[in-house]
Amino acid sequence: QVQLVESGGGLVQPGGSLRLSCAAPKNIFSINTMGWYRQAPGKQRELVAIITKNGNTNYADSVKGRFTISRDNAKNTAYLQMNSLKPEDTAVYYCNLNGRLSFIANARDYWGQGTQVTVSS
């Protein structure tokens, strides 16, 4: 099993910034993508941002220009820098990793436990 360790959530005022981190174990054989999803109360989980092993990124339209995803391959860690936060960004943010545990294993998705982000004055 893969345990993803998330950190960086919290309470912030509108217009503020937060930085989320997601650390994966170093013994993973390969990582295809790392990303962040979020789920607000009463809503479905949605993609926020994703980054490939080559550094290609994709963002939800609602966060383009405000959020930046990055990745440190040496540390197996992904980051989500969130600027100009809005109340509608309030949600539980989940780290996602798609990868293989070993040479013979199939690639699959792994999830973090989630971290709460609340944007409120």
Image (cartoon, helix red, strand yellow):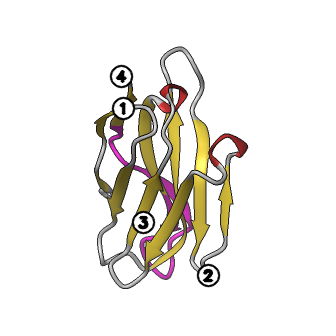
Identify the residue under disc 2: 54
Residue 12, quarter of picture: top left
Q: CA distance from mark 2 to mark 4?
A: 38 Å
The residues tagged by marks 3 and 1 sit, at their Cα atoms, a distance apart of: 24 Å
Q: What is the number of the mark on residue 40?
A: none
Gap in Å between the C-alphas at discs 4 and 1? 5 Å
In the rendered image, the vertical position of residue 77 relative to residue 22, given as above or below: below
- Image side of residue 76 versus residue 60, left or right: left
Residue ID for mark 4: 121
Q: In the rendered structure, which amino acid carries the disc numbered 1?
A: Gln
The answer for how far apart the CA atoms under marks 1 and 2 are is 34 Å
Question: In the drawing, does residue 59 fall left or right of residue 22?
Answer: right
Answer few, some or many: residues within 10 Å of disc 1's Cα (few below 14, many 20 plus, some between 14 and 19): some
Cα distance in 3D space between marks 2 and 3: 13 Å
Q: Verify CB contact (< 8 Å) between mark 4 and mark 1.
A: yes
Where does residue 11 sit, x and y in percent of width and height?
A: 29, 32
Q: Which residues are magenta?
A: 97-115
Q: What residue does disc 3 label?
A: 78
Q: Position of residue 38 (x, y in %)?
A: 51, 37
